[in-house]
Each structure stands twice: as C-alpha cells, then as structure tokens.
Amino acid sequence: MGTQLPIILQAKKIKKAFYQPVEVEVLKEINLTVCAGDTVAIMGRSGEGKSTLLQILGTLDNPTSGNLEIDGAPVTAFNKSMLRNKKFGFIFQSFHLLEDYTAIENVLMPARIGRQPAQKGTVVHERACNLLKEVGLHKRLHFNTKLLSGGEKQRVSIARALCNDPDIILADEPSGNLDRQTAKDIHELLLRFVGQFNKTLIVVTHDIELAKLCKYQYRMMDGKLELITRP
Amino acid sequence: MFELSVACKYLIPHRRQLSVSIISLVSMLVIGLVVWLILVFFSVKDGLENGWINKIVALTAPIRITPTDEYYKSYYYLIDSLSSNSSYKNKNIQEKLHSIATDPYDPDNDEELPASWPSPLLNEFLSLKDLVKEAYESAKYPGATVSDFETAAAHLHLTLLRKGLHSDIDPDETQVAQQYLEHSTYIGSFDDDNPTLSAMLLPPTIRDWENLKEMARQAYVTETISSELAALPSSDKRSILLKDHPKFGHGVLVPQSFKEAGVLIGDRGYVSYPSLTSSTVQEQRIPIYIAGFFDPGIMPVSSKYVLANDELISAIRNSIDSEDALMSNGISVRFAHLSDAPQIKAHILQEMEKRKITSYWHVETYREYPFAKDLIQQLQSEKNLFSIISLIIIIVACSNIISMLIILVNDKKLEIGILRSMGASSLSIATIFGLCGITMGAVGSTIGTFAALLTLRYINEIVFFMTTIQGHDLFNPLFYGSVLPSEVSMDSLLLVIAATACISLLAGVVPAIKASMLRPSAILRSE
C-alpha cells in the first residue's frame, strides 16, 4: 500500500453478522487501509459480502463490530450523513437515479442536500453542467432520467457521484447491468475521472477487466479480504 | 430547501403512482369539504347568534344597573312618600336624578319619621347621599352612555279594520271587516340614541301605507301622519312617531310576530292597565296606534315586548304606585363593543365600592339578565359542543393523510435509500413526509376556505334557490331573519386553520418517523 499518500479510509476488525433467518457471519475481522488517490477493486463470488463491506465502508450500514475512520476521523451516528454527503460518491449497479427528476437535477441533488445554492448561474450548477458534458451528456441535461439508456443513466450516476467533489468514489458493480461495450466505456470513464480529479476509488466487481484497471485487487472469500495483486 | 421540493414532487399526481395520487387528492378534498362545512356552519351560526345577542342588548342594554331591595328599603327612597315636597309620592330613577333636593323631608311640616325606618346614609358633608346620582357617576366610562330605563306591563287591544275580506260576497268592497287582537305586553321605552334599536325597525310595506291612508281617512284627518312616516327610513329621531297624536293617541312599535298575525301600521287600539283607587281597582285605557314593527330576535319575552314613548310608560307607572312597577326601573349603560362588558362592569363595581353604594345596586351584563341568561348559556354550550364535534371531524378527515403517507413511504422506499446515500439525514427524510402532511392539510383547508367564502358570499342566493326547489322556506324567517348572515367568522377560521395545521402535522409524524427509520443499506440491497 502506498505510504507516501495520506490514509483516507481505514477499516479495523470490521465484523458483520446477519441474524435473520439464521445467524450468518458475513464479514470476519476485515482490515483495510486505503490511501488518497488509490484505486481498489474487491472481487469475489456472489453472496460473499462484497456489497455489504462496501456499504459499511460507505457508512450506509453498521458493522456488528469494528472501527471505521474516514480521513482520520472515526465514523459516528452523528457524522454519517455529513460524510456521505461530503466525502463519498456512490455508484450503484442499478444506477439508482431519482426518476422524477432530470439528469441535471439528479447531479445537483447531493449539492442541494448539502445546502449549497444550486440554481442556474451558481458555481455548483456550472460544475454539474461541466460534469455532464464530460460524461458526454451535454445534450441530455434536461432529459428525464426515465428516458435515458442504461449507459447514459450510469454516466449521470458517475457525474452525480462527483458533484460534491468527494474524496472517495464507492462503486458497486458499476457495469453489472450494461453490455460489454458500454461496460468498457463506463470503466474507462470512471478510471479517467478518478485519475483526472485525483479521487480514491473502491469498486466491487465481478469484472476482471475492471479490476485489472485498479491499483489494488482484493478477493473476498469466507468473510475475509485477501490482497491478490500489488502494484 | 430540498425537502420541500421533494415533498411537492411526491404530491404532484403521477400516472406511475396512481393510487397515491388518488388517495392524496381525495384526502385534500375531504379536508376541504370539512373546512368548508365547519366555516359555513360556524359563520352562519355566529352571525345569527351575534344578531340575536345584539337584539337582546338593543332592547335592553349591555349593562343594566337595577336597584336592590336595600334601595327600596332605604331612607333615600322611602322619604319621598312622607314628604310634601315630593307630593307624598315615591320617585322613579329619572325623577330622582332630576330632583333638586336629595332630601325633600321637612321636619317642620312633614309627619314624624317611623321608628322602624333605617337611618339616612350620609356623605362626607353629612348630608343625605344621593344614591341615583352616585350610581350615575359610577357608571360613567369613556365611550359609554348612561340613561335610565323603565318597563311597564299592560294589556294591548287592537282593532283591525280590513276591507275586501269578503270580496267574494261584496264585489264593491264597501263592507269593512273588524277583527280584534289582545295581548298582554311589556312596554319599554324607545331610545333614539340607541342605533341598534333603530336598525331593528322593519320597513313599512305597501299594505301598511294603504292602511295608514285608510286610518287617516276614517279619522277625517287631513294632515295625515303619513308625511311623518314617510320620513321613517331617513329620520334620525324616530321617536317623533311615537308622540301622543291628538286623533290617534300614542304611537307604539310592536314586534314582528304582530305583523305575522296580520297587524298593519296604522291599526289602532288601546293599552289598558289597572289603576288603584282608594276602594277599588279601575281599568284605565290609553289610545294607541301601530307606528311600526321591529325584529326582536329570539329573546324569550320578545313577542310581548312593545316599544313606546316615555310619557305612555310614565302614565301607566304613575297609576300603579307600587314597588312592583318600579322594580322594572333602572339605569342602562350602552357602549359599542359587547366584549367590553365584563371590564366595564368591574369598573362600575369598583366605583360603587369607592362610593360605598354597592349594596343598593345590582350590576348585570347582558349575559346575566334573567330572561337572556339561559339562552346565552345555551348558545355558548352549543358552540362548545359543535367545536368539539368539528375537531373530531377534522381529525377523521386528517387521518386519511396517515394512510396516504404510509402508502407513499412504501412507494418511495428506494428514493429514500438514494437520498440517504447522498447524505440526506433521517431528519431530512422525516421533514419531507411531515411537509407532505402539512401541505395536504394546507391545500385542503385553502380549498375549503375559498369554497366557504364563495358560499357565504352567495348564501342567500343559494337559500333562495333551495327554497324555490323545495317549495317552502328552508329557514324560518321569524327565527333566522329574512337573510342569513354572510360574514365569515374569524374565530372559526382561526380554529379550523390551526386545528387542520396541527392535526395534519401530527398525521404526518407517524409516516415520517417510519420513513426516517428505514435503513438505506436494506433498501438499496433489496432493490
């Protein structure tokens, strides 16, 4: 792991167990340290707990035990919302866009949740327009997201993840619902953005091609995280 | 504030969420309907009640000061019956007020005071305290007018002469049919300075005019009083009509129920009352004619209340020289706002206390009058009861919001998860659904308020339309008046708006808590 860069995310002894319908320990003492600007791929078979780990790292879920520090600060019940808004950008397999809103409104939503002025003419609005231009959707700004294709939706999703200029992008199988060519385009776009904006990327994927593009590759097996490739 | 825009987005009907849209629309309409119903009902009810109370107050006064037994047993009152300066006659309040000598007793000429009499109440100058003048002084308050009132009881006899009652038998209508009407009445004084009383007068009809002309013709009066009556709607001093006319006697104003019984302006008759002589009781008669009608409202004794000039009342009172007649004598205190009554009463009592005359006077506001107390209490209890019922109806109407919002929360689970993943706090999520509840309540009550304002504006047209369809009066005009009140009741408006806002907010709380408790990881994983 790079030592010259500051640690942006540190997970210590993360455990997660589900108790319904029977007790299953999905994560067993996971330790993970990610430095700023790192790209990390987590692979593994379905049901191994990759997405659960990503949600815990993104503060969407609570670990049964263990500690998580983001940018040196421990995650508590009180700073979770703020962390999700300021430090993380999420990209989901099913895109998870707000369907009653246009592309630009979707991209602006994290800024509005963060109480930033997001009307036309503001810096935030301009940034959102630029992001959509960068992902190739400058002609779809005011399109309702229902009308967009899968690839376009994921591009909007990537632009949205970057709206608040977060430190860490968490992607959960970002190309899982896309065809091979579109998936490739999305991978390139994602990695280009991460490099261009100097973000940290943690991606959960089955796609070896995407994993290969990342600096670190981990495999989840039996609830444990195993580093399989070092740069 | 993104919460408000998200809440509005949720409430705008979409084809995708048809069930939620229909339920929210129905909920808002139900709230609107309830608000409309309550506002119209309370506005009309308040308007009617205020009208009734105003009429009760117009016939009496917002505050009355009446003498107590102590007053009638006092040296101050009794002394007139023993003094030659007072012609050995008890004085009423007006006479007491205008009498120059407070103590008319002359120890040299008048007979000796009975031993059982109370000793005179003296002031700081050791002369007899003038209880009436002191009471008048106590009753003085900025903006209030103080005057005396007197009510007498007498029998009213009217002779109704009508032409054309037998026109089927007598086509030339030469025959005049005669009818009689007798009524025991209370005769009160007509006070020109009381604007509400003047407003209660009903305008004369064409039949009244014709009857008046007929009265003049029969009495061979060339200078008819119709010219005076013609000035009725514009005259400031209506009591001119009630003065003693050499041909017709005193003019009296009778309640609307007489009009319903077929009495017309210009009908003549007399009032009779018993007069005590040394050995027997004689019936005395004073000729009167009907000079007009007034709408007395719903006061229990209103159908018996007749208004006349002070001379007529004095004539009756003087003939019955007893305490009973004087018991209906007192001081009226009139002022513009009825709501000031308790405050003015307290002021009067305080002033009387200072003058040490409290035991001689009984101060009552219109809410305490024996003849109006039950009615006013009943109106108040009805109002309280209806307020509770309205509150329950609003709760039932707003409970729709709970079910609608719970369905909405289930529908929007994924969006809640997405918003949470973008950093929306659970408080923000709760706020979104709370705002949905408040918005529904606000939209519903706005619809209802506008509908109520529109209904009240055209209420009399609506009643007329309904009456035409039904073929009979929707509301009894004798009881409710010829037109229904159409002014919106601000109290009810405030009550309804505040209750709807509170209850819709409370209705939004349960779904809002449910929404905020949803775990984003569980939602996003399941989707």
Image (cartoon, rainbow, N blue to C red):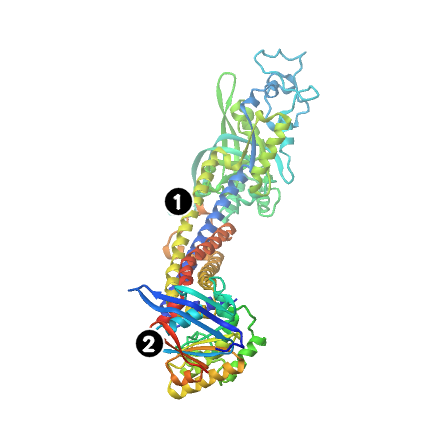
- Left or right, A146 with reference to B329: left
Q: Disc 1 marks which amino acid? A: His
Q: Residues within 10 Å of mark 2 (few under 14, many from 20)?
A: few
Q: Quadrant of residue B260?
A: top left
Numbered mark located on residue A46 in the image: 2
Specify the farthest residue to the right.
B125
Chain ID of residue with mark 2: A
Please state the chain letter of the residue tagged with numbered disc 1 in the rendered image.
B
> Is B438 left or right of B92, judged from the image as shown?
left
Q: Secondary structure at mark 2?
A: loop
Q: Quadrant of the C terminus of chain B?
A: bottom left
Foreground of the two, A30 or B324? A30
Amino acid type at mark 2 = Ser
Residue B515, x across and y down, in percent: 41, 63
User: Is residue B398 among the parts visible in the rendering?
Assistant: yes
Is A1 located above or below residue B109 in the figure? below
Count of numbered circles in the view: 2
Residue corresponding to mark 1? B166
Which is nearer the eye, A222 or B124?
A222
Could you tell me residue A75's position as x and y percent? 48, 65
Q: In the rendered image of this protein, does residue B421 appear above or below residue B441?
A: below
- Which callout, 1 or 2, points to the residue nearer the camera? 2
User: Picture coordinates of residue B496 (x, y %)?
Assistant: 47, 53
Q: Is residue B265 visible?
A: no
Labels 1 and 2 within one chain: no
